[in-house]
Image: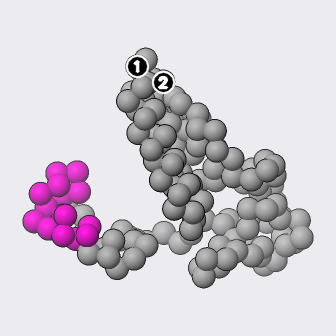
């Protein structure tokens, strides 16, 4: 499952699903659980149905009515009124455009802060992850400090 089509094609996984959403939103838009679940169902169905090695399914969902959000990825912008509709999340479920210079040559960077430890949407999710990985029985996650 990917939002980076060219990178995924270069890696050539056995099967993949592409969603044309901003990086970091591969499973859909924040705070839209029905959409997130449908994207996951469609992804799992595609993995069952893709038969040719290297196949990539393209999910039909759109981030917005236009593709203006894509312009922001590579276009310098320092004025809030010039920013496309893909705005910066504020952390309280809303979003706003930032008028502050980004400090990276004028390019906007709306990625969320990266953390060295896993981040969860709720304490219940964190507890479930700790419980399922207690004792490092998951060989994929062995050694990750929860």
* Count of labels in the image: 2
Kindly indicate whether the residue at mark 2 contacts the one at mark 1 (C-beta within 8 angstroms).
Answer: yes
Disc 1 designates what residue?
A: 51
User: Which quarter of the figure is the C terminus placed in?
Assistant: bottom left
Under circle 1, the secondary element is loop
**Residue 2, horizontal then vertical, whole percent:** 51, 43
Please name whichever residue, 139 or 74, is drawn nearer the observer in this view of the structure: 139
Disc 2 designates what residue?
A: 55
Under circle 2, the secondary element is strand
Give the extent of the magenta segment: 128-142
Q: Residue furthest front?
A: 34
Q: Is residue 129 left or right of residue 123?
A: left
**Residue 46, horizontal then vertical, whole percent:** 45, 32
Please name whichever residue, 128 or 145, is drawn nearer the observer in this view of the structure: 128
Residue at (63% x, 50% y) in the render = 21
* Residue 61's disc number: none
Residue at (61% x, 77% y) in the render = 93
Name the front one of labels 1 and 2.
1
Q: Residue furthest top?
A: 52
Residue at (34% x, 79% y) in the render = 123
Q: Is residue 140 magenta?
A: yes
Q: Quadrant of residue 137?
A: bottom left
Q: Is residue 52 left or right of residue 25?
A: left
- Local packing at callout 2 (Cα closer than 10 Å; few below 14, some 14-19, many 20+) is some
**Residue 44, horizontal then vertical, whole percent:** 41, 39
| Cα–Cα gap, marks 1 and 2 | 7 Å
């Amino acid at each position: 499952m990917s939002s980076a089509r060219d990178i995924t094609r270069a890696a050539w996984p056995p099967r993949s699903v592409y969603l044309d959403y901003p990086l970091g939103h591969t499973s859909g838009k924040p705070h839209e659980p029905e959409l997130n679940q449908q994207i996951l169902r469609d992804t799992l169905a595609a993995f069952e149905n893709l038969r040719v090695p290297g196949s990539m399914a393209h999910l039909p969902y759109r981030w917005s009515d236009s593709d203006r959000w894509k312009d922001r990825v590579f276009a310098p912008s320092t004025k809030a009124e010039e920013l496309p509709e893909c705005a910066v999340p504020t952390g309280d479920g809303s979003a706003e455009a930032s008028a502050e210079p980004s400090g990276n040559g004028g390019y906007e960077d709306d990625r969320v802060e990266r953390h060295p430890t896993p981040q969860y949407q709720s304490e219940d999710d964190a507890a479930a992850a700790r419980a399922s990985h207690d004792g490092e029985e998951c060989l994929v996650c062995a050694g990750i400090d929860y």
